[in-house]
Structure formats: structure tokens, C-alpha cells
Image (spheres, grey):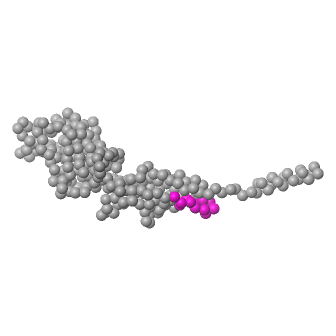
Amino acid sequence: MMLLSIVAIPFLMACSEDEPEKILPPVAAFETEKEIYDEGEPIEFFNLSENAESYLWTFGADQTSDEENPVYTPVIPAHAQGYGFRVKLVAMGADGITDTTETYLRASKRILGSITITEISENILGKIPIEAGKETELFLLTGMLNDPYDWINEYQTFPSRIIDENFSIPYEYYISPVWPDVYMGNQQWFFHLHASVTGNEEVVSVKQIVFNPTHHEWYDVEQGYKAFEIGDEEITIEVKFIYFSF
């Protein structure tokens, strides 16, 4: 009996070693930094799936990717101010079993509404030409940095403002009615403040700021509008815009 027992032990061990490894089913999961993105802003997808060996992403109707952590840039149709799209992830395990998850994201254009100078240094104020008894025309040019400058002037962007020695802030510029629906997307933009005394042909460059709207977090300012701030130690500007969250 003792001999039989000794022989049986290796047999039982061999059986346990031959058992197939249990394959766990895949679990599809992912996340993004936010739910609403700007036009032209890349969306990074962070894959949190488990027990998966391959992936298939679908963005909107037909854009796909098999990367583990893809980056997708939504393109808003020219006639639209924003749109929503579905993102679906299919995770496949080693045995061909799949699991699917999806979510709904939105992309919107920032429609420029107004620009307000909220802070300005004594150094900048000193650059604005002001003469007693005369008015100074203060205008703000804006546009995309890589566009030709010949089409940019105060009549296409923001109407010039008339100031005098009693100039104070905050100071607001409104978008010109001849340049409606200015979309501020994922590009380099500039604001360039100029000034000249009425009747004087000399135009003084006061301050220029270059920025990318999508690199600045926005906040709510009033119903239907949001805003973000740009600037440096010399000037602070609040940019107000319409953001379609639909």
C-alpha cells in the first residue's frame, strides 16, 4: 500500500500542472480629461481596459484607430458652431472575447464676443499718446498669427475707441458688426493695441500679445457666455465668447 501511495503522488502533481490557465474576460474602459473640447483641440484617450490584447476605437461615424491610447482631433463642419459625437471602444481578449464601452463627447467653436482690458501697468499707460484738449483713438487689432496682415484693420476687427486724459479701466471692445462669428480655435492668435492722437498721422504700437485660446481655461461670466484671461505683468485682458455646450 505504501508503494502505491508513493507512485500516486507524482501522478496527481502531473494532472494539476496540465490544467489550462484560466483566461479572464476583457473589460473595456477609458477616460478623457473633459467632455467638451474646442475646435481643432486634440483629444487624448486614456485606455483603462483590463485583460485585453487589442483594441478598436470608433470616433463619430467612421473614424477608427487600433492604437492603445489614441489622439483624435474633432473637425466641426463649416456650417456648424459645434457638434457631438460618439466614441466607442472594443477591447478584445486573448481568446477572441470582446467587451465594448462608449461615451458621448462634444466639440464647440469659441465665437468671440468682446475683449476687456481689466488691468494695465503705468508703463503701458505711458505709451498711449494723450494731448490736452485732444482725443486719442485707441484701437485693438486681432487675428490669427499666420494670416497676412494686410486684411487686418480696426474696421474688420474691433471699432476704435476714443479716450482722453480721463481714460480708466476696465475698458471694453466689442466685435465689429462687419466681422461676425469670429471663431477662436486651436491656433496662434494675437491682440495688438495701437493708439494715435486725433488729427495726427503717427500711430503708436502700445502692446502685442500672442496666445492660443485653447491653452487657457475658461470660466462662466454670464448666461450664454464664458471667458478666459490672457496677459503678463503689463496688461490683463479678458476675452468673452459664446461656447456651445448643447
**Residue 53 horizontal/vertical position (percent):** 58, 58
Q: Out of 195 and 221, give the one closest to the viewer.
A: 221
Q: As drawn, which residue projects farthest toward the right?
A: 1
Q: Which residue is rendered at x = 76% and y = 54% of the image?
A: 17
Q: As drawn, which residue projects farthest toward the top?
A: 122
The answer, for residue 173, to whether it is visible in the render is yes
Left or right of residue 234: residue 90: right
**Residue 217 horizontal/vertical position (percent):** 35, 45
Tell me if residue 100 is in the magenta stretch. yes
Q: Quadrant of the C terminus?
A: bottom left
Q: Quadrant of residue 122?
A: top left
Q: Is residue 88 above or below residue 161?
A: below
Q: As drawn, which residue projects farthest toward the bottom?
A: 62
Q: Quadrant of residue 198?
A: top left
Q: Which residue is rendered at x = 39% and y = 59% of the image?
A: 84
Q: Out of 195 and 163, give the one closest to the viewer.
A: 163
Tell me if residue 15 is in the magenta stretch. no
**Residue 190 horizontal/vertical position (percent):** 25, 48
Q: Which residue is rendered at x = 8% and y = 37% of the image?
A: 131
**Residue 152 horizontal/vertical position (percent):** 19, 54
Left or right of residue 107: residue 67: right
Q: Which residue is rendered at x = 32% and y = 46% of the image?
A: 220
The answer, for residue 216, to whether it is visible in the render is no
Left or right of residue 37: residue 125: left
What's drawn in magenta, residue-wise? 90-101
Q: Is residue 228 above or below residue 180?
A: above
